[in-house]
Image (spheres, helix red, strand yellow):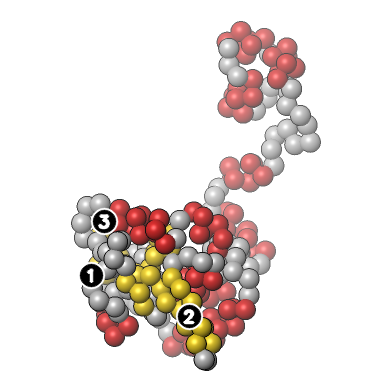
Amino acid sequence: MDDDVWPEVAGWEQKWVLAASRVGHINYIPPSYERYSPRRPMTAMNLGVGAVVGGMAMAQTTEALACVGYMDTRFGRYGHEHSDFSIRFLRAGFGGVRCPVEDGIHNRFYLLDSGIKLLDAVSSASHEDLENNGKLLNELQKEPIYRAPWYNDEEMREFLAEFGPGFSEMNDPPFKGKTFDINSYYQNHEDVYLSGYDAFSHYIENGIRENREL
Protein backbone atom coordinates (compact mmCIF):
# COMPACT_ATOMS: atom_id res chain seq x y z
CA MET A 1 0.00 0.00 0.00
CA ASP A 2 1.35 3.42 -0.94
CA ASP A 3 1.44 6.19 1.65
CA ASP A 4 -1.25 8.20 -0.17
CA VAL A 5 -3.84 5.38 0.10
CA TRP A 6 -6.52 6.00 2.74
CA PRO A 7 -9.01 3.43 4.11
CA GLU A 8 -12.58 4.73 3.87
CA VAL A 9 -14.41 2.20 6.05
CA ALA A 10 -13.64 -0.05 9.00
CA GLY A 11 -12.84 -3.58 7.88
CA TRP A 12 -11.91 -2.44 4.37
CA GLU A 13 -9.06 -4.97 4.28
CA GLN A 14 -11.42 -7.95 4.51
CA LYS A 15 -12.52 -7.47 0.90
CA TRP A 16 -8.89 -7.42 -0.18
CA VAL A 17 -8.09 -10.55 1.83
CA LEU A 18 -11.07 -12.37 0.30
CA ALA A 19 -10.22 -11.25 -3.23
CA ALA A 20 -6.58 -12.30 -2.88
CA SER A 21 -7.59 -15.67 -1.44
CA ARG A 22 -9.78 -16.27 -4.50
CA VAL A 23 -7.35 -15.34 -7.28
CA GLY A 24 -3.90 -15.17 -5.66
CA HIS A 25 -3.16 -11.53 -6.49
CA ILE A 26 -5.31 -8.41 -6.73
CA ASN A 27 -4.48 -4.85 -7.74
CA TYR A 28 -6.05 -1.42 -7.35
CA ILE A 29 -7.12 0.90 -10.14
CA PRO A 30 -8.12 4.47 -9.18
CA PRO A 31 -10.95 6.54 -10.69
CA SER A 32 -8.37 8.68 -12.51
CA TYR A 33 -7.66 5.67 -14.75
CA GLU A 34 -11.26 5.81 -16.00
CA ARG A 35 -10.51 5.13 -19.66
CA TYR A 36 -8.76 1.90 -18.67
CA SER A 37 -11.36 0.90 -16.07
CA PRO A 38 -14.04 -1.77 -16.20
CA ARG A 39 -17.43 -1.11 -14.63
CA ARG A 40 -17.52 0.00 -11.00
CA PRO A 41 -17.77 -0.79 -8.18
CA MET A 42 -15.45 -3.77 -8.17
CA THR A 43 -15.95 -6.14 -5.26
CA ALA A 44 -14.24 -9.26 -3.94
CA MET A 45 -16.94 -11.45 -5.45
CA ASN A 46 -17.34 -9.40 -8.64
CA LEU A 47 -13.83 -8.36 -9.63
CA GLY A 48 -12.92 -6.01 -12.40
CA VAL A 49 -10.72 -7.12 -15.29
CA GLY A 50 -8.52 -4.64 -17.09
CA ALA A 51 -5.31 -4.15 -19.02
CA VAL A 52 -3.83 -1.54 -16.63
CA VAL A 53 -3.06 -1.62 -12.90
CA GLY A 54 -2.58 1.32 -10.57
CA GLY A 55 -0.20 -0.33 -8.13
CA MET A 56 -1.21 1.96 -5.23
CA ALA A 57 -2.51 -1.07 -3.30
CA MET A 58 -2.04 -4.78 -3.86
CA ALA A 59 -2.80 -8.00 -2.04
CA GLN A 60 -1.56 -11.50 -2.63
CA THR A 61 -1.44 -14.88 -0.95
CA THR A 62 1.72 -16.28 0.58
CA GLU A 63 1.63 -19.06 -2.03
CA ALA A 64 1.66 -16.53 -4.86
CA LEU A 65 4.33 -14.40 -3.22
CA ALA A 66 6.57 -17.44 -2.75
CA CYS A 67 6.47 -17.99 -6.52
CA VAL A 68 7.15 -14.36 -7.44
CA GLY A 69 9.42 -12.96 -4.74
CA TYR A 70 10.05 -9.23 -4.39
CA MET A 71 9.67 -6.13 -6.51
CA ASP A 72 12.65 -5.77 -8.83
CA THR A 73 15.08 -3.19 -7.42
CA ARG A 74 16.41 -2.35 -10.88
CA PHE A 75 13.39 -0.09 -11.44
CA GLY A 76 14.88 2.30 -8.94
CA ARG A 77 13.03 5.36 -7.72
CA TYR A 78 9.85 5.51 -9.78
CA GLY A 79 7.87 3.90 -12.57
CA HIS A 80 6.58 0.51 -13.74
CA GLU A 81 7.91 -1.56 -10.82
CA HIS A 82 4.34 -2.44 -9.83
CA SER A 83 3.48 -3.42 -13.41
CA ASP A 84 6.40 -5.82 -13.57
CA PHE A 85 5.38 -7.23 -10.16
CA SER A 86 1.79 -7.90 -11.26
CA ILE A 87 2.84 -9.28 -14.65
CA ARG A 88 5.05 -11.80 -12.88
CA PHE A 89 2.05 -12.91 -10.80
CA LEU A 90 0.16 -13.46 -14.04
CA ARG A 91 3.08 -15.43 -15.46
CA ALA A 92 2.99 -17.61 -12.33
CA GLY A 93 -0.74 -18.22 -12.75
CA PHE A 94 -2.17 -15.71 -10.25
CA GLY A 95 -4.21 -12.53 -10.47
CA GLY A 96 -5.45 -12.52 -14.05
CA VAL A 97 -5.05 -14.07 -17.47
CA ARG A 98 -2.61 -13.78 -20.36
CA CYS A 99 -4.29 -13.66 -23.76
CA PRO A 100 -2.37 -14.72 -26.87
CA VAL A 101 -3.05 -12.40 -29.79
CA GLU A 102 -1.47 -11.87 -33.19
CA ASP A 103 1.13 -9.37 -31.95
CA GLY A 104 2.06 -11.23 -28.76
CA ILE A 105 0.57 -11.59 -25.28
CA HIS A 106 -1.96 -9.20 -23.74
CA ASN A 107 -2.27 -9.09 -19.94
CA ARG A 108 -5.64 -8.84 -18.18
CA PHE A 109 -5.49 -8.18 -14.45
CA TYR A 110 -8.07 -8.79 -11.73
CA LEU A 111 -8.89 -5.43 -10.13
CA LEU A 112 -10.51 -4.09 -6.97
CA ASP A 113 -11.47 -0.55 -5.95
CA SER A 114 -13.36 -1.19 -2.70
CA GLY A 115 -12.79 0.44 0.68
CA ILE A 116 -9.96 2.86 -0.11
CA LYS A 117 -9.33 6.21 -1.77
CA LEU A 118 -6.27 8.19 -2.87
CA LEU A 119 -5.23 11.37 -1.10
CA ASP A 120 -3.71 14.31 -2.95
CA ALA A 121 0.06 13.91 -2.94
CA VAL A 122 3.06 15.38 -4.71
CA SER A 123 4.31 12.90 -7.28
CA SER A 124 7.98 11.97 -7.50
CA ALA A 125 7.63 11.03 -11.17
CA SER A 126 9.99 12.20 -13.85
CA HIS A 127 9.75 11.68 -17.59
CA GLU A 128 13.27 10.24 -17.71
CA ASP A 129 12.52 7.64 -15.01
CA LEU A 130 9.30 6.58 -16.72
CA GLU A 131 10.96 6.25 -20.10
CA ASN A 132 13.94 4.25 -18.79
CA ASN A 133 11.78 1.98 -16.65
CA GLY A 134 9.36 1.44 -19.53
CA LYS A 135 12.21 0.02 -21.58
CA LEU A 136 13.34 -2.09 -18.62
CA LEU A 137 9.81 -3.45 -18.17
CA ASN A 138 9.87 -4.91 -21.68
CA GLU A 139 13.38 -6.31 -21.29
CA LEU A 140 12.57 -8.16 -18.07
CA GLN A 141 9.67 -10.16 -19.50
CA LYS A 142 12.11 -12.82 -20.65
CA GLU A 143 13.75 -13.20 -17.24
CA PRO A 144 12.74 -15.79 -14.61
CA ILE A 145 9.59 -14.95 -12.64
CA TYR A 146 11.16 -14.97 -9.18
CA ARG A 147 13.16 -11.94 -7.99
CA ALA A 148 15.38 -11.75 -4.91
CA PRO A 149 15.12 -8.75 -2.55
CA TRP A 150 18.47 -7.45 -3.82
CA TYR A 151 20.33 -7.24 -7.11
CA ASN A 152 23.90 -6.78 -5.87
CA ASP A 153 25.99 -7.02 -2.69
CA GLU A 154 25.39 -3.40 -1.71
CA GLU A 155 21.61 -3.85 -1.89
CA MET A 156 21.90 -7.10 0.07
CA ARG A 157 23.76 -5.36 2.92
CA GLU A 158 21.22 -2.52 2.94
CA PHE A 159 18.29 -4.95 3.00
CA LEU A 160 19.67 -7.11 5.81
CA ALA A 161 20.67 -4.06 7.88
CA GLU A 162 17.00 -3.13 8.25
CA PHE A 163 16.44 -6.26 10.37
CA GLY A 164 18.94 -5.16 13.02
CA PRO A 165 21.79 -7.10 14.63
CA GLY A 166 19.51 -9.91 15.80
CA PHE A 167 18.97 -11.06 12.22
CA SER A 168 22.73 -11.47 11.67
CA GLU A 169 23.03 -13.37 14.93
CA MET A 170 20.48 -15.91 13.72
CA ASN A 171 22.62 -16.47 10.61
CA ASP A 172 25.57 -17.27 12.90
CA PRO A 173 24.13 -19.56 15.62
CA PRO A 174 25.97 -19.65 18.97
CA PHE A 175 26.65 -23.41 18.73
CA LYS A 176 27.69 -23.40 15.08
CA GLY A 177 29.39 -26.67 14.17
CA LYS A 178 28.25 -28.37 17.38
CA THR A 179 25.34 -30.55 18.40
CA PHE A 180 23.29 -29.34 21.34
CA ASP A 181 23.39 -32.14 23.95
CA ILE A 182 20.44 -31.88 26.32
CA ASN A 183 21.85 -34.36 28.88
CA SER A 184 25.23 -32.65 28.92
CA TYR A 185 23.63 -29.25 29.48
CA TYR A 186 21.60 -30.59 32.41
CA GLN A 187 24.71 -32.25 33.90
CA ASN A 188 26.71 -29.04 33.66
CA HIS A 189 23.87 -26.94 35.06
CA GLU A 190 21.97 -28.84 37.72
CA ASP A 191 19.93 -25.75 38.64
CA VAL A 192 18.38 -25.78 35.17
CA TYR A 193 17.53 -29.48 35.49
CA LEU A 194 15.95 -29.00 38.91
CA SER A 195 13.92 -26.05 37.67
CA GLY A 196 12.24 -28.19 35.02
CA TYR A 197 13.26 -25.68 32.32
CA ASP A 198 13.69 -27.08 28.81
CA ALA A 199 17.44 -27.23 28.25
CA PHE A 200 17.55 -25.77 24.78
CA SER A 201 15.05 -23.01 25.56
CA HIS A 202 17.03 -22.07 28.67
CA TYR A 203 20.27 -21.86 26.75
CA ILE A 204 18.81 -19.63 24.02
CA GLU A 205 16.88 -17.39 26.42
CA ASN A 206 19.32 -17.24 29.32
CA GLY A 207 22.39 -19.45 28.94
CA ILE A 208 24.06 -17.44 26.17
CA ARG A 209 23.70 -14.22 28.14
CA GLU A 210 24.99 -15.96 31.30
CA ASN A 211 27.99 -17.46 29.38
CA ARG A 212 26.99 -21.01 30.34
CA GLU A 213 28.88 -23.92 28.84
CA LEU A 214 27.11 -26.24 26.40
Identify the residue at image location x=46%, y=73%. 97
Q: Which residue is mark 1?
A: 41
Q: Quadrant of the N terminus?
A: bottom left
Element under disc 1: loop
Element under disc 2: strand
Element under disc 3: helix
Residue 160: quarter of image: bottom right
Residue 150: quarter of image: bottom right
Q: Quadrant of the C terminus?
A: top right
Q: Which mark is residue 12?
A: 3
Q: Residues within 10 Å of mark 1 (few under 14, many from 20)?
A: few
Q: Which mark is residue 99?
A: 2
Which amino acid, by three-letter code, is at mark 1?
Answer: Pro
Query: In this rendering, would 42 be left or right of 213?
Result: left
* Residue closer to the observer: 95 or 78: 95
**96 is higher (above) or lower (below) than 203:** below
